[in-house]
Amino acid sequence: MRVMVMVKATVDSEEGVMPTLELLEAMSAFNGQLVEAGILLAGEGLKPSSQGKRVAFDGPGRTVIDGPFAETRELVAGFWLWQVKDLDEAVEWVKRCPNPMFGPSEIEIRPVYEASDFGEEMTPGMTEQLEIMREKTSGA
């Protein structure tokens, strides 16, 4: 199964405080372990929400909202996309992760929908198109 592993933002990450050399080295080593285990599919750190935008949908209407966004603990500061056998394996890997922030922090794990989760609504043609898109975007 694939899971999205999200590093929750903190006041420091929203203020743009950059990680130390030691933290970068620790995270790089952890990412290397994920690659060696064949788990890491993608991952990136995100800049503060003050540099982001949201697009709100209401029927045909679209509204662009400039950051920063409230509720820092609900924001995402970085993510990985992992291929794991189950949520328990993902939890065990997250427990091995260095603390990604200077103070208290949280990492959230969410299963990714697979084509089979959509049942009959996902036609064989749509499944094939999804697989082609994944092949074209892998490693991007």
Image: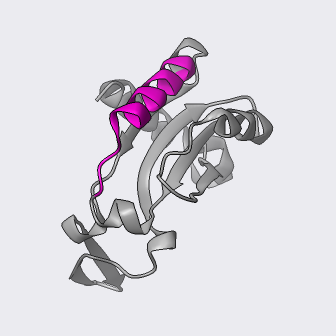
| The C terminus: image quadrant | top left
Give percent across and percent down for residue 63.
23, 84
Asked whether 20 falls inside the magenta stretch, the response is: yes
Q: Which span is picked out in magenta?
A: 17-34
Look at 67% across and 49% down and name the residue there.
Answer: 117
Front-most of 82 and 72?
Answer: 72
Residue 62 in the figure: left or right of residue 42: left
| The N terminus: image quadrant | top right
Front-most of 94 and 52?
Answer: 94
Q: Quadrant of residue 20?
A: top left
Give percent across and percent down for residue 19.
35, 44
Give percent across and percent down for residue 85.
74, 29
Give percent across and percent down for residue 34.
56, 23
Position of residue 103 relative to residue 27, above or below, is below
Residue 126 in the figure: left or right of residue 55: right
Position of residue 114 relative to residue 50, above or below, is above
Look at 45% across and 62% down and name the residue there.
Answer: 9
Residue 138 in the figure: left or right of residue 87: left
Position of residue 43 relative to residue 111, above or below, is above
Look at 76% across and 36% down and name the residue there.
Answer: 86
Q: How many marks?
A: 0
Look at 46% across and 46% down and name the residue there.
Answer: 79
